[in-house]
Image (cartoon, rainbow, N blue to C red):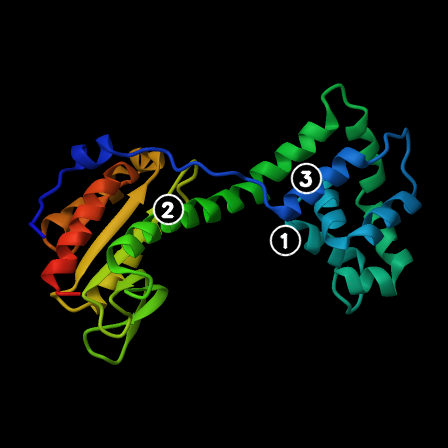
Amino acid sequence: MKRYRQTLAEVVSLLSPVETTWMDEHSAAVVTTITNLPIKDDYSRADVNALLADDFDVGITMIRLVLGMSKDEFQLHMAERLEGPGGTGVTRFHKQNDVFLDALDALGLREMLAGLVHRPVDWKDILTERLRFGRGSAIKGQKRGRRLEDTIEKIVKDVFGENGFDTRCRFVGSSGLETEKTDFAIPNKDDPRILIECKAYGATGSKQTDVLGDIERIVLQKRSDTQLLLVTDGMTWTLRMNDLRKLIEWQNTGKITRIYTQRMATDLEEDLKQLHKDHSL
């Protein structure tokens, strides 16, 4: 494989969004529950009890959406009202049903639910949007990263074969005593000649700084003659230019062999084919 010296402008020009869906099975179940909830002027304790009895996890998620609370906030407020040991989960709900419903009443759940239902804005849309921006944003991040990994895995498999690599593993470092995480180790995690790390980002950049630490740990652990390829994408990089500039610097000094984006999939495949020959794999 030939040696590259990439530029910031070159990589930025090849960035593209990493699209995925925000909804998983749990979110879909919550949306179904929201849609099927009967519209009433007032909601009784029996209504709340039925919501939780049907599917506790789904019901609790919907309740948190109505209250506009995060999981941690909700558990804290419930713990303050559920005195003594026993937690705030399904076991407490079944063992101390009246006490549990009292705590939800104290939080104003039924009044807030009735208020939401009768707002001029569609209450279903409000709860669905809260779900999308809360749980949904985390799911999108997970799926975005996995989608990029799956795309790269197909390329790696085409070049090196079904058993020619280890994936999502810890490779053995140069000392033979320590290991570090990587997405792909070729031909295997025990003696890798090539390492591939995948990082994808979309609308939020809360974890982008972690990329530098992840890559640096790999660089410190790998043998100097082991090639490290970084595959990344997502338009949020344009808001984190200093981090991207640092990665370009590492590429220029040989710590990273080459940086790829989705639009460089053909380049990645060609380079892997050349590395396959170079290492006689």
Q: Which residue is the extreme one toward the bottom?
A: 177
Depth check: give the residue in front, 82 or 41.
41
The x, y position of residue 30, in whole percent, is 70, 42
Q: Residue 164 occupies which quadrant of the picture?
A: bottom left
Could you tell me how many numbered marks the image carries?
3
Q: Residue 101, can we see it?
A: yes
Residue occupying the point 9% across, 46% down: 4
Is 170 placed above or below 37 here?
below
The x, y position of residue 256, in whole percent, is 17, 54
Q: What's the amino acid at mark 1?
A: Asp
Residue for badge 3:
68
Judged from the image, the secondary structure of the residue bearing numbered disc 2 is helix
Mark 3–mark 2 Cα distance, whole angstroms, equals: 32 Å
Nearest to the eye among marks 3 and 2: give it.
2
Bin the neighbour count of mark 3 within 10 Å (Cα to Cα): few under 14, some 14-19, many 20 and up: some
Residue for badge 2:
148
Judged from the image, the secondary structure of the residue bearing numbered disc 3 is loop
| First-in-chain label (2 vs 1) | 1
The x, y position of residue 202, in whole percent, is 41, 38
Image quarter where the C terminus lies is: bottom left
Residue occupying the point 64% across, 51% down: 71
Residue occupying the point 36% across, 66% down: 169
Residue 6 left/right relative to 134: left
Q: Give the label on residue 72, or none.
A: 1
Mark 1–mark 3 Cα distance, whole angstroms, equals: 12 Å
The x, y position of residue 86, in whole percent, is 77, 68
Do the residues bearing badges 2 and 1 touch, measured as CB atoms within 8 Å? no
Nearest to the eye among marks 2 and 1: give it.
2
